[in-house]
Image (cartoon, rainbow, N blue to C red):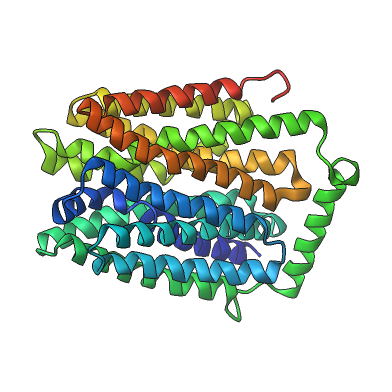
Amino acid sequence: MASEATRVAFAGMLLMIVGMGIGRFAYTPLLPGLREALGWSLAQAGDVASANYFGYVAGALAAATIASRSLQRRWLVAGAIGSVLTTAAGAAVLSGYGWLALRAGSGLASAFILVLGTSMVSRRLLVLGRPGLIALHFAGVGIGIVLSVLLIEAARVAGLSVFGQWALLGIACVVCTIPALVMLFGAKGGTSARVAGMEAHATSAAVAAGTPAGQASPTAGRLLGRLIVAYGLFGFGYVVTATFIVEMARGLPDARIAEPLAWLAVGLCAMPSTAFWQWVAARLGTWRALRIAFATEAVGVLLAGYGGGVVALVVGGGLLGGTFVGITAIGLAAGRRIAPERADRVMGWMTAAFGLGQWVGPAVAGRLAEASGGFGLPSMVAAGLLVIGYALLRDRGQP
């Protein structure tokens, strides 16, 4: 079963490349070119980014209501196809309203991939006895970011416009999606009767391990509430830098070097981050690991916003990349452990809170940047919210 577990994790990684690393985050390195081509202000650019996160919230809430395993599979496939189409369509959309709709659709698709894909992959890895391989699944975010940087830079050297770069990324998404779906749902990659039976047993065991009548205890409910709020603040806290870091680089004297380096640092540090934070959580406890990650990310956000140079921007981007995927993974794992009998719904609620923070963040940051003449003020607000999230995660009832 080891080979089957590896195949499942690798398929999940490919889907995360498509839906998250490229579908969600390619907008960041392509944003300066889009602004130049379409004449957007920073506020307009922030609104388009927020549309993506609006779609993400809607998708997360919808995914949280899908209880049937067969429906989860169908909507995961729909999310993968939708992510491919909305990425490729970036090659042809020229109007502001068109981009609002396109990025909203992309957010909807990526939420299905994150919520349903992560739920499916984590369940299968659990019953196959390899839950630690979820780190490979989440590594897809960083791999997708790095891949997008390399493809965009290659396209620029070849003389392709920003719209041609979107088309190239769409092709890359097709190349990743087909084998991912075959490995997860093909004749040899689908859930075997044995694994399906084990999955059902694991679900029953999780419910049996919960409190009577499947209800969380008051302490568990309080902890889950704090975690969800902190997770939402994290959504705002990371997304300002994650959306505008390449735009920040464009304002530097060494912009041509700083732009790819800053985003590459995010992706390279994101790739091993889940495995790293799993290691920290195993030694210090999940909640303490989350607090350390929140604090580290706040430092990275401030460095990127206030550093004023290539080194500060790259280090800030590295701290962002090294924490935001790890927080996503171990945060979701913490929520599942608090309420195992309704783990899929908890994952949907947390993703929706996360998406709500992301939805508000870019629109607010774009306007603050225009009003203040830079990204220092929005970065300060983002770091402050991360500090509040840190405080919410400090409680004597938490491990």
Look at the picture and state if 71 lies above or below 388.
below
Quarter of the image that includes the N terminus: bottom right
Residue placed most toward the observer, 320 or 190: 320
| Position above or below: 323 against 267 | above
Q: Residue at x 60, y 23 (%)?
A: 392
Q: Which x, y percent locates residue 347?
A: 63, 48
Q: In the shown orientation, is residue 255 left or right of residue 273?
A: left
Taking depth in this image into account, of 196 and 169 the one nearest to the observer is 169
Residue closest to the eye, 40 or 116: 40
Q: How many marks?
A: 0
Outermost residue on the bottom side: it is 187
Residue 186: % across, % down: 57, 78
Identify the residue shown where x is 44% and y is 54%.
Answer: 140
The answer to which image quadrant residue 231 occupies is: top right
Relative to residue 353, is residue 118 depicted above or below? below
| Quarter of the C terminus within the rendering | top right
Residue 287 visible in the picture: yes
- Residue 302: horizontal and vertical position, in percent? 33, 24
Query: Which residue occupies 29% across, 48% down?
Result: 28
Query: Looking at the image, which residue is at 81% across and 38% down?
Result: 216
Q: Residue furthest front?
A: 97
Is residue 175 rendered to the left or right of residue 339? left
Q: Is residue 315 visible?
A: no
Residue 371 image point, x, y percent: 24, 28
